[in-house]
């Protein structure tokens, strides 16, 4: 197949490399423009741009799939368009330009979690079974016919970054099966079944943890917002990012008398910083106080005299 590929972040790179390794002719790669990164705001190419140039593929940098992208794609006469986390919508006339249209590798079991942050929202909701779906693009959001899909379980507390990395790798199998099936005519797609839910983009305030919730809910919330936008609590009205946490187990870490444990109180137990929750506790393995570098949670707490209150 002659394929135009559109993608931007690191999570799209395994798909590009898999299609190339499978022998498909990648006639062009569209990715978003170089963006300023880091404290010095240095213009940096996207991970997909870097990978495409390593593979010797022609690259178009464009923040919208509009007239320029349409003309550039038309000149390459693709059989199929493949999009993975590009960060923009494909509309007509580009949508109908390739002979086989466009397909998308989406990181959920559609129609559940359509939208921008499917893995993050699924984890935040406490789901442990995560999926990928390859579907035909239509003008409605993530609503096209399903061609292939896969799913697997993750452990509670698996952060979204790690879950996305795993799905990006395992999802290449579903993508390659979809492309092969479209090429030989064995797969045409079936309509999505079930109730649609939406995974809205996360903002900074989505990262604030509600410590009055159950331990399972707090851990799930933390997982869904880690590493971005980042989980945090307020200590003395200042945000403290919780970079790494885990459920506290055992008598050395969990208070014997839950009635006396104030929700949000943080103390040292067995050399570990532990925050009390409504029905359990979390270990604060690594934290980042406002304006300071990341550090061991216990070291941070010792610097505060061994105790703190979070809310």
Image (spheres, rainbow, N blue to C red):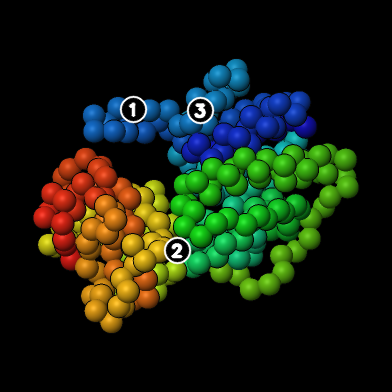
Residue visible at 59% across and 52% down? Answer: 107
1 or 3: tag closer to the N-terminus = 1
Q: Is residue 141 left or right of residue 87?
A: right
Disc 1, SS: strand
* Residue 296 percent coordinates (x, y): 27, 45
Disc 2, SS: helix
* Residue 289 percent coordinates (x, y): 19, 49
Residue visible at 74% across and 39% down? Answer: 176
Q: Please tell me how crowded label 1 is: few (under 14), some (14-19), or many (20+) other residues with Cα within 10 Å.
A: few
* Residue 284 percent coordinates (x, y): 31, 55
Query: Would you say the residues marked 1 and 3 are in contact, meaning their CB atoms lie under 8 Å apart?
Result: no
C-alpha separation, residue under disc 2 versus residue under disc 1: 34 Å
Q: Please tell me how crowded label 3 is: few (under 14), some (14-19), or many (20+) other residues with Cα within 10 Å.
A: many
Q: Is residue 86 above or below residue 159?
A: above
2 or 1: tag closer to the N-terminus = 1
Residue at image mark 2: 220
Q: For the N terminus, which image quadrant?
A: top right
Q: For the C terminus, which image quadrant?
A: bottom left
Residue at image mark 3: 49
Q: Name the mark nearer the viewer: 3 or 2.
A: 2
Q: Is residue 115 above or below residue 3?
A: below
Q: Is residue 265 above or below residue 139?
A: below
Residue at image mark 1: 43
């Amino acid at each position: 197949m002659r394929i135009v590929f559109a993608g931007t972040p690191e999570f799209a790179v395994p798909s590009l490399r898999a299609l190339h390794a499978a022998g498909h002719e990648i006639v062009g790669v569209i990715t978003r423009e170089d963006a300023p990164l880091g404290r010095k705001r240095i213009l940096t190419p996207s991970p997909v741009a870097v990978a495409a140039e390593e593979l010797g593929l022609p690259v178009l940098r464009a923040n919208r799939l509009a007239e320029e992208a349409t003309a550039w794609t038309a000149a390459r006469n693709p059989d199929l368009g493949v999009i993975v986390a590009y960060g923009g919508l494909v509309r007509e006339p580009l949508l109908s330009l390739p002979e086989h249209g466009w397909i998308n590798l989406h990181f959920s079991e559609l129609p559940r979690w359509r939208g921008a942050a499917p893995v993050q929202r699924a984890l935040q909701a406490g789901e442990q079974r995560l999926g990928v779906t390859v579907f035909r693009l239509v003008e409605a959001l993530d609503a096209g016919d399903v061609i292939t899909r896969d799913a697997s379980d993750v452990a509670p507390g698996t952060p979204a970054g790690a879950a996305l990395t795993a799905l990006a790798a395992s999802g290449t199998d579903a993508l390659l099966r979809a492309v092969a099936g479209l090429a030989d005519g064995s797969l045409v797609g079936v309509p999505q079944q079930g109730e649609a839910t939406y995974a809205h983009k996360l903002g900074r305030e989505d990262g604030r943890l509600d410590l009055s919730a159950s331990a399972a809910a707090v851990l799930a919330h933390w997982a869904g917002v880690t590493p971005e936008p980042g989980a945090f609590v307020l200590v003395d009205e200042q945000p403290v990012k919780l970079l790494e946490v885990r459920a506290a187990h055992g008598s050395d870490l969990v208070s014997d008398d839950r009635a006396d444990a104030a929700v949000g109180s943080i103390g040292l137990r067995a050399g570990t910083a532990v925050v009390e929750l409504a029905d359990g506790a979390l270990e604060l393995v690594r934290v980042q106080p406002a304006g300071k570098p990341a550090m061991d949670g216990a070291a941070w707490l010792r610097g505060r005299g061994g105790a703190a209150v979070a809310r």
